[in-house]
Each structure stands twice: as C-alpha cells, then as structure tokens.
Amino acid sequence: MRGYKILSGVLFAALLATITLTASAQQSSGNTDAAPQMSADARVKSDEEADKKAAEWVTSLNLSDKQKAQAVTSVIATHLKTIRDWNNEHPYTTVPAGINPATGTPLNTMDRQIIAISAMPKSVHENLMNGLRQNLTEPQVEAVLDKYTIGKVAFTLNGYKSIVPNLTAEEEKVILDNLKQAREQAVDFKNMKQISAIFEIYKTKNEQYLNAHGRNWHEMFKAYTDAVKAKKAAAKQAAKASQ
C-alpha cells in the first residue's frame, strides 16, 4: 500500500510560499511555463463535461428539493472547473526543482505537482464544503466526496481490514478518520494519480499509528501478500490437477 512519497506539513508550508513567489515572478516576466491555453471549443466541451458530472452525482443523491439539487449541482460544477483551471495554469514546472529536506532526495514530478496545486486559495475548498453543507446532510456530503475520489475511503479501509489481524474498533476509527481527511483534501486535485498521492500521506500516518501501538506494519503486509500468493498458487495447482 505504498506509492508516491509526498512532502507533508511544515515542508509544504515553506514550498507553497516558493510556488507563489515563483508564479508571480514568471507572470511579471511573461514566462509562466504554463500549459497552452484551452481553445474556446475545448473549454466549452470541458465545461459541459463538468456540468454533466455534477448533475449525475447530485442525481445519485435522490434529492426531493429541486432548488437544493440545483444549488449543489452548481457548487460542484464550479469546483470541478476551478480545479481544472488551476491545474492547467500551475504545472509542476512552476515549482523549482530541489530536494525534499526531510529525506535529501530530489523532488519528483508528483511532489512538485502536489505543491503547485496545494497553493490554490483556501477559499476554493471552503466554497465547495460550505456549499455542500448548506444544502446536504453530512452523509450526503460524504457521498459527494466519495464521487470525487471514486470510493477510495471504503476501498482502502477494506484493505486494512484484510491486512491487519483482529483490527480493533479504536484502530479502525483512527484509520477511518485519517482516510476521511485524505478524501476531503483530495477533492481539490484533478486526476486519480494526484488523488492517490494525497491518500498516500494519510496511509503513511495510519501505518505509523499502527507501528506506534504495538503492530508491525511491515510484517503484517508481508504476511498478507504471502498468503495471497499462496492462495493463488494453490488455486493454480488445483486447476492443473483437475485437467
């Protein structure tokens, strides 16, 4: 359950300042390193796709209040378009190449991309969450966030349940809380690689929590993968014997 190694907390704060200053300097000099602007036709098509996706997500909530449904659809569509535009206008190249101060390893493309996107104004996220909570119950809000992240909270939690023997109620609560934090943060990112990278931050927190409370994540994960391999080998052997 490992993936991208992403900077966290304090390191993000320092680098977010860098990306803001870099973007301002590039705009002043007329060299933004940004991706080419969308054509008018491409923007219209992209906007239509965002509107359609927002409408489908809201339809799945089965809201009886049409006014609320329209309001939520507008909030979601606006957010989808905003994060699209921010991604397009702030490529990873706006973050200077350098090293991760925590590890000494070079920042990879995903590190730099996450930093660039994380510099998005907080109001973008607040507008989404406030708009959802003004019109929806908390379970409905969570259902929308799950749409953004294609159900990664439940999927990842099930992974922990399979890997960690006799997962306690307290362990599950801590893990689930971290995954929900990952989900809410991830809705401000554009694609699944970025979303998965955000989840990796919180999966690492979960593994650190388990290790600090008497578990050994490395041993549990190895035992799980060994069991999966053994099961596949046994099934393959059984199929061969039946031929």
Image: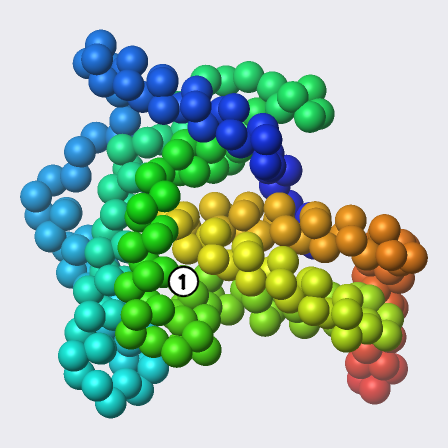
Q: List x then y, in percent, for residue 171.
A: 77, 66
Left or right? Give the position of 35 relative to 229: left
Question: In the picture, which quadrant includes the N terminus?
Answer: bottom right
In the image, residue 102 above or below residue 208: above
Q: List x then y, in percent, for residue 169.
A: 77, 75
Task: Name the residue carrying label 1.
Answer: 148
Viewer-side residue, 71 vs 149: 71
Q: List x then y, in percent, for residue 3.
A: 64, 45
Q: Residue 215, located in which quarter of the rendered image?
A: bottom right
Give the amino acid type for the residue marked by disc 1 in the picture: Tyr
SS of the residue at dot 1? helix
Left or right? Give the position of 158 relative to 221: left
Q: List x then y, in percent, for residue 73.
A: 22, 69
Viewer-side residue, 177 vs 183: 177
Q: Residue 100, located in which quarter of the rendered image?
A: top right
**Residue at figure coordinates x 58%, y 28% from the top left:** 11
Q: Which residue lies furthest to the left in this view?
A: 40
**Residue at figure coordinates x 45%, y 78% from the top left:** 139
**Residue at figure coordinates x 33%, y 39% from the top left:** 121
Q: Can residue 157 be seen in this view?
A: yes
Q: Residue 104, located in which quarter of the rendered image?
A: top right
**Residue at figure coordinates x 47%, y 57% from the top left:** 184
Question: In the picture, which quadrant includes the C terminus?
Answer: bottom right
Left or right? Give the position of 102 relative to 239: left
Q: Can residue 52 be seen in this view?
A: no
In the image, residue 86 above or below residue 51: above
Q: Residue furthest bottom?
A: 64
Classify mark 1: residues with Cα within 10 Å, few (<14), some (14-19) or many (20+). Answer: many
